[in-house]
Amino acid sequence: MSRQRYVRAAAVALLSSAVLYSTTYAAPSDQGTFSTMQGVKAQALSVDEMQAITGELNAYNIAAALYAAADKLDKFPRLQTATTNLADYYFFNADTINARYAHLGILTPCTVSVCHQ
């Protein structure tokens, strides 16, 4: 990568981080003045809400979803190959990955037919 590309990449990263980590957002109002929002208040989620948004943290479920996604990528062979390779990684390392998920307390039940118990 040339020096000019490094400088350009650094500038983009710097500007992006400034936008992402800014605490104040200014938006124009209808009268031509600006209003600001400072900070964001967080609200705790209920157990039902947490369960509704919990992902499929089981390597077999992830592998199955990746295989299904790869099947739909016929028009993009390189992306299809990469997605299949990632699915293979999850499938062939599922026991190790699931052991880590279980250790962290985030393993969800396997919902596909190829689960190892």
Image (cartoon, grey):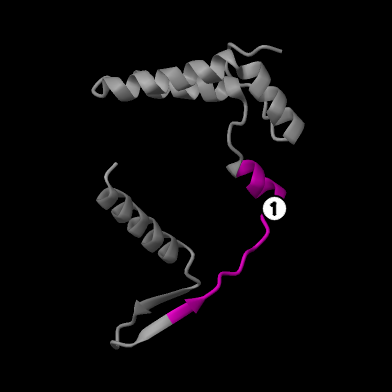
Residue found 65% across the figure and 42% down from its top: 51
**24 or 4, which is in the foreground?**
4
Q: Using the rendered view, name the quadrant where residue 60 is placed.
A: top right
Q: Residue furthest front?
A: 3
* In the image, residue 73 lies in the stretch drawn in magenta: no
Residue found 71% across the figure and 13% down from its top: 117
9 over 104 or under it: above or below: below
From which residue to which does the magenta span run? Answer: 36-52
84 over 107 or under it: above or below: above
**115 or 12, which is in the foreground?**
12
Left or right side of 24 for 54: right
Q: Which residue carries the number 1 mark?
A: 46
Say which amino acid is labelled 1.
Ser
Residue found 48% across the figure and 20% down from its top: 87
**What x and y, as percent, mark residue 69?**
39, 24
50 over 104 or under it: above or below: below
**What x and y, as percent, mark residue 66?**
45, 23
Left or right side of 110 for 38: left
**What x and y, as percent, mark residue 99?**
71, 23
**103 or 46, which is in the foreground?**
103
User: Looking at the image, can residue 73 be seen?
Assistant: no
Circle 1 packing at 10 Å, graded few (<14), some (14-19), many (20+), is few
Residue found 23% across the figure and 23% down from its top: 75
